[in-house]
Image: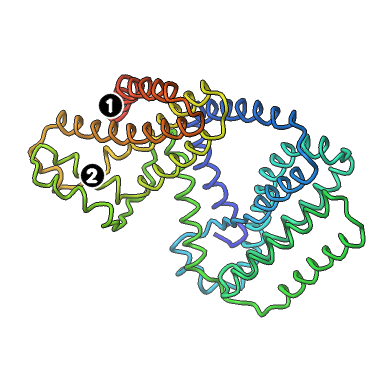
Amino acid sequence: MSIESLWSSRFQQHIQNAITYFARMINGLLYSFIFVSCVGAYYYAKFLKTDPSKGISLLLITIVLTLIITRCQVRTFIQKPDAVYLLALEEKLISYFKKSLLYNYIIQLFPLLFTFLILVPLAMQSLQLTVPFLCTIFIILMILKGWNIYIHWMWRDSYEKSIWFIIRIACNALIIYMLFYAANVIVLGGLLLLLAFLLLYTKKQPTKRIPWEYIIEQEEKMDIRFYQFASIFTDVPQLKKQVNGRKWLTNWIEPLLHKKRATFFYLHTLAFLRGNDYFGIYIRLGVIGAFILYFVPNIYVKGAIAYIILYMISMQLRSLWKYFSGNIIVALYPIDTEKRMNQFLRLIFILLSIQLIVFSSIILIATGQFSHSLIIMIIGLIWIKFIIVPKTKQRVSSF
């Protein structure tokens, strides 16, 4: 296979894999998108009705667009064996990486466009910007995004990577602020010349060898993030088992070792705390849920969001059931499947109940109404006990 056809082959494999997973999670993804879009549109409209000041609007637009433009991930489709088999062909891989950069640029324009369209009503209302002027701004933002991807790629594994990251943030924030502030053309032109100077400086740097280990590591991280996202909606066998020490977390369950009836409760708890990123996802979803529950004003929406996030957490934890599949030592334990299932479901119930208590406490802090938070907690316990736990049992039984 030639270098020219290698990238196309890898790209097709990636697209086929992505399509396979999106097809499997289309229903859950669609419902989640509709729900988030409706809730987001409702509160965004309410925010616009408050007629935010020009300063607040400008600050919000600058922060959001700076984050979107600064964030640059470059997928190269490089695999571990390439570090050996393509090592002698480094000089011929220039066209391969150019195609990768172009692909990443095009792909990352979509979230930029989506975010920009969301911010357009705010810019038109608070900053009194016209549609033609906003179109011009977006063209400049497209150029800025390309500049960021190139600079990020060229300094990706350098000791100066952090410095260039700060430079990119500063340049992005200044240019975006000046664009929407409708600053003097001379000032804006000076900033664009600065970008051109930094680009030329980067281009004149000596050609470096391909950092195979770094590129492969980044590629694997992006794969893991995609599979973790997909695992919210469907089973993902590609997720590798990873073990984290976290002794400070596991010490408290050591006494369970002496309880013969809690063997698999202990094992699954240990897997939750140390295996893959179950604990991290559990905490992240909890923090996101708590943040949303605190700021959403409507008590009914608070309850609905709390129950949806609890269900999402349960979906993430389902794969814990087969974490020890293929482990011969675990298979030798004289415990039947029904007892193991009951201990697993007990862990799920406890973990979700802890999140429910946290969510109810956040609602109590946000509203100051004990009765509302208590009702949400009681309904939540019923939701967990009679809906989520049986559904979890049904799904894991089919694994």
Residue 105: give x, y in percent of width and height: 68, 53
Quadrant holding the C terminus: top left
The residue pinned by badge 2 equals 324
Picture quadrant of residue 185 = bottom right
Asked whether, in this view, residue 175 is left or right of residue 228, the answer is: right
Q: Residue at 66% x, 43% y: name it.
A: 111
Q: Amino acid at mark 2?
A: Phe
Q: Is residue 155 above or below residue 57?
A: below
Q: Residue at 30% x, 55% y: name it.
A: 243
Residue 96: give x, y in percent of width and height: 62, 61
Q: Secondary structure at mark 1?
A: helix
Number of numbered discs present?
2
Of residue 109 and residue 385, the one placed in the foreground of this image is 385
Between discs 1 and 2, the one toward the N terminus: 2
Residue 91: give x, y in percent of width and height: 61, 73
Asked whether, in this view, residue 299 is left or right of residue 61, the answer is: left
Spot the residue most to the bottom: 206
Q: Is the Cβ of the residue at disc 1 closer than 8 Å to that at disc 2? A: no
Q: Mark 1 or mark 2, which is nearer to you?
A: 1
Of residue 158 and residue 240, the one placed in the foreground of this image is 158
The residue pinned by badge 1 equals 393
Q: Classify 10 Å Cα crowding around label 1: few (below 14), some (14-19), many (20 and above).
A: some
Residue 194: give x, y in percent of width and height: 80, 68
Q: Secondary structure at mark 2?
A: loop
Q: Residue at 50% x, 72% y: name it.
A: 87
Quadrant holding the N terminus: bottom right
Q: Is residue 106 above or below residue 353?
A: below
Q: Amino acid at mark 1?
A: Lys
Q: Is residue 112 above or below residue 6?
A: above
